[in-house]
Image (tube, rainbow, N blue to C red):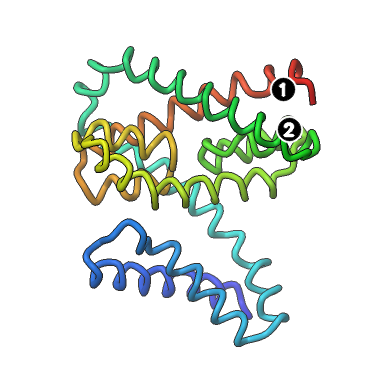
Amino acid sequence: MSALTALGLSVLTYLAGLWIQRRTGNKPYMHPVVLAMLLVVLALAWLGEPYTEDYLRHNAIMLDLLMVAVVAFAVPLVDNLRLVLRDLARLTAVVLLAAVFIAGSTVALCLAAGIDREAIAAFSFRSVTNPIAIAIAEQNRVSVDIAMFGVFVTGLVGVLTAEPLLRAVRITDPRHVGLVLGITSHAFGIARALEFSSLAAAYATMGMILTGLLYAFAVPWLLRFLPL
């Protein structure tokens, strides 16, 4: 399998997932990334192990494209910059409280499960978008693969469950929905927020940025004091 074929498989399965999502009423649990992943698994299972190894090797370009996509999320933020700046202090406070709870609960669960120090450090980045998580992991000699896995699973679960939970407690304000998606689901959440409105995407982007900055500065320092 060539690099172009691997890239084409990723793009085509995502487009197929997007088409299925729209045909089923844009349900959050019919996320195009989830559907694309299932289609890729089926395709590689049919093609065999050599093609799977080629796909994994060539598909690193998708990670580079992800970093470009994350930068592009600044567009809805610029469009709603005045509103976001007005709420900046409250946004920062919410992100701080959420980050403390997420990091604390992650470390506590990992300790209870008997997970080793390196894995705990990697999983603690789970609410940070992949480009930031990779940079933090590399600089602190933490497993990049485990960090990426934690980020992916967290984002996927968050984007599938956040909306039903928010509806259950009657939270429908696009600013609040976007902020929750950005904090809990990072790039996945922003992509989903874009389907609601530019305002929701702006608050999701701000949630992701503030969470990433907080983790980038705080997590490496805090890990030195944890009883791991």
Query: What residue sits 31% from the left and 72% below the top?
Result: 20
Query: What residue sits 24% from the left and 67% below the top?
Result: 22
The residue nearer to you, when weighing 53 against 177, is 177
Residue density around tag 2, few if under 14, some if 14–19, many if 20 or more, within 10 Å: some
* Left or right: 192, with 42 as reference point: left
* Left or right: 175, with 143 as reference point: left
Could you tell me how far apart the alpha carbons at marks 1 and 2 are, in whole angstroms?
Answer: 13 Å
In the displayed structure, 204 sits above or below 29; it is above
Query: What residue sits 55% from the left and 41% below the top?
Result: 131
Query: What residue sits 29% from the left and 37% below the top?
Result: 178
Mark 1 in CB contact with mark 2 (< 8 angstroms): no
The residue nearer to you, when weighing 201 against 102, is 102
In the displayed structure, 101 sits above or below 145; it is above
Quadrant of the frame with the C terminus: top right
Disc nearest the viewer among 1 and 2: 2
In the displayed structure, 69 sits above or below 58; it is above
Quadrant of the frame with the N terminus: bottom right
In the rendered image, residue 79, in percent from the top left (x then y), is placed at: 21, 33
Disc 1 element: helix
In the rendered image, residue 46, in percent from the top left (x then y), is placed at: 60, 87
In the rendered image, residue 18, in percent from the top left (x then y), is placed at: 32, 67
* Left or right: 149, with 16 as reference point: right
Q: Amino acid at mark 2?
A: Leu
Q: Look at mark 2 in the image and give the residue it sits on.
A: 111
Residue 171 lies in quadrant = top left
Q: Amino acid at mark 1?
A: Leu
Disc 2 element: helix
Residue sitting at the far top: 89
Q: Look at mark 1 in the image and give the residue it sits on.
A: 223
Residue density around tag 1, few if under 14, some if 14–19, many if 20 or more, within 10 Å: some
Q: Please state the total of marks drawn on the protein image.
A: 2
